[in-house]
Amino acid sequence: AQSVSQHNHHVILSEAASLELGCNYSYGGTVNLFWYVQYPGQHLQLLLKYFSGDPLVKGIKGFEAEFIKSKFSFNLRKPSVQWSDTAEYFCAVNTNAGKSTFGDGTTLTVKP
Amino acid sequence: DTGVSQDPRHKITKRGQNVTFRCDPISEHNRLYWYRQTLGQGPEFLTYFQNEAQLEKSRLLSDRFSAERPKGSFSTLEIQRTEQGDSAMYLCASSRQGDQETQYFGPGTRLLVL
């Protein structure tokens, strides 16, 4: 069975600070990896995804994530956060069988 | 932009009542998923359809829950004899087979069982 672990439940940063959110998954086969973001009052939106190829993937709004297969990790990064990045971030994994397994999310609060 | 839509957005019901939620996926998407999300947790998979066929159901989906997608377009999720533990956000997502399983989510239906 797949599982996803997000290490930080709540992260508080000041504007312009760098961000790294951890995500580890458990699954022995080939996986597709995602980060979703949920802004206050809005629904889940896709931030970025990894399927194959270059393990460093870039998403919207300056976010990027690196897939490290040996560590079963897919950490999300942003060099300089903005107040508007305040949101909840979810890491998810699926196989080609369809369903996604999500982590419990990390709430990011960016102080202006 | 015709994204995934869900109706209703909020539902308050009394314990023991039946409720039904609807999801309209993105029109060209043949896969449709239902998830449930409670406070402080990520979405948990309930079931998914490919066209009108229900291909997988989670153990979370007790016999009080039933989902249908009769014509391979919209889907309904019914909960019979609701319990307070059913209070949650019910999310629908859709994807196009072959699009690397990228799922697009609707706004959800928030259910409160009193």
Image: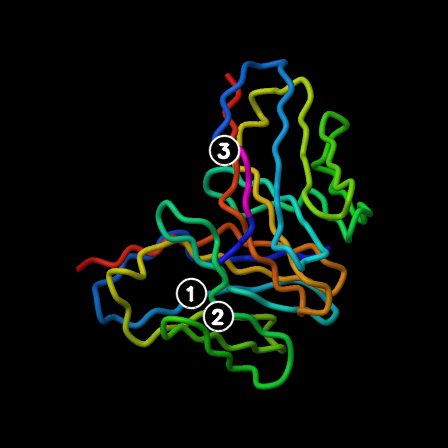
Spot the residue most to the bottom.
A54
Depth-wise, is mark 1 or mark 3 nearer the camera? Answer: 3
Give residue A21's mark. 1
Q: Characterize the magenta stretch by its predominant secondary structure.
A: strand
The reply to whether dot 1 and dot 2 touch (C-beta < 8 Å) is: yes
Q: Give whichever of A107, B73 is nearer the camera.
A: B73
Give residue A102's mark. none
Kindly identify which chain the residue marked by label 2 belongs to.
Answer: A
Q: CA distance from mark 2 to mark 3?
A: 30 Å
State the SS at label 1.
strand
Q: How far across and how far down the image is residue A66, in percent?
A: 51, 77
Say left or right for A30 vs A36: right
Depth-wise, is mark 2 or mark 3 nearer the camera? Answer: 3
Marks 1 and 2, the one that precedes in the sequence: 1
Q: How far across and how far down the image is residue A12, in percent?
A: 28, 57
Kindly identify which chain the residue marked by label 1 belongs to.
Answer: A
Circle 2 sits on which residue? A75
Q: In the image, which residues are magenta?
A: B5-9
Is B39 situated above or below B11? below
Disc 3 marks which amino acid?
Answer: Arg
Q: Marks 1 and 3: same chain?
A: no
Spot the residue most to the left.
A112
